Amino acid sequence: MKESFDVLIVGVGGQGTILASNILGEACLIAGLPVRGAETHGMAQRGGSVVTHIRIGGVYGPLISPGTADLIISFDLLEALRYRHFLKHGGTIITSDAVIMPTSAFTAGAEVPTPAEIMARLEDVACTVVDAAGLAAEAGTILAQNVVMLGAASHALPLSEEGLREAISRSVPPKTVETNIRAFELGRACLE
Amino acid sequence: MLGNEVIAHACLEAEMDFASGYPGTPSSEVIDYLRHQKDREFYVEWSVNEKVAFENALAAAWTGIRSLVTMKHVGLNVAADPLLTSAYTGVTGGFVILSADDPYAHSSQNEQDSRRYALFAKIPCLDPATVREAHSMMKAAFEISEEVGLPVLFRPTTRICHSKSDVDLGVPGTGHRTGEFVRNPQQYVVIPVHTRMLHKKLNDKQPGLAKMLVEVGFNTAEVRGKTAIITGGIAAAYAEELISEGVSFAKVGAYPIDPEWLKAFVDQHDTVLVIEELSPVIEEAVRMAATTTVVHGKMDGHLPLEGELSPAAVAQAMASAGFTPTKTYPVVTPEAGVPARPPLLCAGCGHRAVFYAMRKVFKDGIFPSDIGCYTLGIQLNVVDTTICMGASITVGSGIAQSGETRPVVCTIGDSTFLHTGIQGLLNAVYNGANMIVIILDNRITAMTGHQPNPNTGVTATGVASPPVSIEAICRSCGAPWVETVSSYDLTGLLQALQTAKERDGVKVIVARQPCVIDARRSGIRRKPYVVDPEACTGCGLCVKFGCPAIEFHDDKAVITSLCSGCSVCADICPVGAIHKGGAK
């Protein structure tokens, strides 16, 4: 049996990890690939750390075990660090350069590593950092950071650019298609 | 497509005529998908609790139409009373009970296994291993129910409900039925003389039922060698990825398991490993069936009795029981020193201000709470107990009547109050408890995804329905003092709590403000607030409020773009450094 390409999408509740996984799922359908995915709903999603599993070409269960992900797409630098142990040897992390400060940093004085410290701790893996917020703003709305990140990750995905564009058009609200396609293009271009 | 949407679509294909349910993760999206269908030819409702939902759907099935009721696993506890006797009465139209289990308790208070309920009630249970199987099983469930005249329990788990999969959907059916109730007191009136006969009838159905479920094809077995893996539910998908050649494979998707079928398979093997999530339901049946075969599973410690399984956990169980998995998983440790990021109440959530006021007025209070977003108040030290839906007021009155002298202040959401909170209030007032009940009224069932309830003003399908008066309900329960305050009015909250503190009996405060997410969706925009850095003394009081929109940099508070303009922090600031400003 051919192996699946296992992608973990991580971020903070509200950043659009589920929409990003919807887009990848849709792109699999367009490409005629089987796909399995698992996501976080309910209480766990409110502002908390969230993780979505997508197994492109997967035919078994939806969960990705630690140490086996081919790619981690992270919408927050701190979350990239939290989930890095899911990455397989030789896997890739593509992450936003920003950190949303956990509220515990202010209410309970929790120690939060700085972006530079996080980057130092990720030095031993193939990790690419993207200015997701800046590119999303350039595309028209900072809400499109998730699609910027998909664009940046698109080079590493076994899915065609055309398929991903089509999947975005089908998955986002009709009024926002243009902005999101622009976000995808800017994300894709930044890593060419 | 999401598992729950696939399940709902299967109901459309099966020409389901009636659906009811109470929201609960991971089950909620089934009714949400059905209620948003255009050109509906079936009836769909959000009910006020699972017992109500169950009885509505059961009665619909008594009229000969196909009916569905949905809930989460713990909801089935609420509906257990009609469940157990509905097996006696049976049904004429297909009746499917969807009870979604939550291994690992991602969003639940326990890890109970709904399969046990099906065995207890002596009704068939279908347990899908994949989203694709959930689709075919849900369609079959209605047919099986009609064939055997019994309710069918359909039991997906979180990793089915909230999984995505490619799936081949069928076409929604159009052959809907109209209900017609045929009087038959011997079936529908369970007085002792009837119920004794009905119980015998139910027991007589059992052997044929188990045989039929093998024929339907959801229990499959393939002999490939002298060792075997027997599995069911999502664990079957994990095991299939890892099973070696020459190891036999049996998958249980339907219960009760035919003992003869199981014994015939088990007897052909020297060693069997049973892999399933939650309770050892299959394993117990296998151990009963086995004579000389060695059986491994949860009961001899190869698999955990709690939590959810994963491919790595299944591989580990296989290795420990002497079955070589086709893949091994690296042992990795998560990064240390990454601060936790638990879920939080939203910026602008009305609950936070109420919690803040409670702590101010009741420094030594005891705070029983309930199930909803507000359970997150545990982070603000204002949630002392949570056990099940509606149990804030009852736990509160129990503590208040125990001789405990500290003040009892309990919190409950509007949907939970209407679910099973009213009886607790009625009881507390009737028996003269001394306590405060705060109803956190955000007009909607927020945590499960903003489903409407009788307090919202619309039904599941968007038809206007006059919102109930929570105050009138409380007064008619006998509560002599009922005050309503805006959750954003900190001064008003403090005053109401202070007044309540000085009174005897059951005092009710309704703290009302629409859920901030729902308010934003319906177009309510408030100007955000900003901190004047000149005036800010860096005292940190606003930061301790715990709002995710307030950060603290260089000894000054800063309000971020998450601010929704609730204004409460401006009331907290002792030097008036926070004021309205910035763009909407």
Image (tube, grey):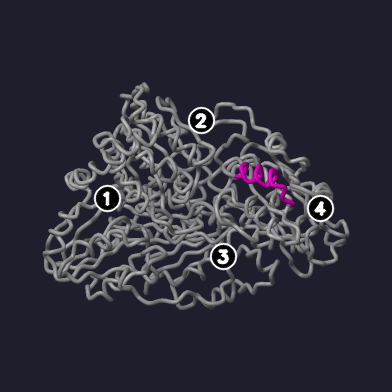
Mark linked to residue A97: 3
Residues behind callouts 2 and 4 on a single chain = yes
| Image location (x, y in percent) of residue B386 | 59, 57
Q: Are marks 3 and 1 in contact (CB under 8 Å)?
A: no
Q: Which amino acid does label 4 sit on?
A: Lys
Rounded to the nearest angstrom, the CA distance separating label 2 from label 3 is: 43 Å
The secondary structure that most of the magenta stretch takes on is helix
Mark linked to residue B255: 1
Residues behind callouts 2 and 3 on a single chain = no
| Residue A161 seen from this side | no
Mark linked to residue B461: 2
Residue at disc 3, secondary structure = loop
Front-lying residue, A144 or B392? B392
Q: How crowded is mark 2: few (under 14 residues within 10 Å), some or many (20 or more)?
A: some
Front-lying residue, A136 or B130? B130
User: Does A145 sit above or below residue B429?
Assistant: below
Residue mark closest to the camera, 2 vs 3: 2
Residue at disc 4, secondary structure = helix
- Using the image, name the chain to which the residue with label 3 belongs: A
Residue at disc 1, secondary structure = strand
Residue mark closest to the camera, 4 vs 3: 4
- Using the image, name the chain to which the residue with label 1 belongs: B
Q: What residue type is labelled 3?
A: Asp
State the quadrant of the C terminus of chain B. Answer: top right
Which residue is drawn at the image coordinates 26% and 51% (left, top)?
A: B253
Q: Residue lying furthest front in this view?
A: B193
Q: Which amino acid does label 2 sit on?
A: Thr
Front-lying residue, B498 or B169? B498
Rounded to the nearest angstrom, the CA distance separating label 4 from label 3 is: 50 Å
Residues behind callouts 3 and 1 on a single chain = no
Rounded to the nearest angstrom, the CA distance separating label 2 from label 4 is: 42 Å
- Magenta stretch: give its range: B421-434
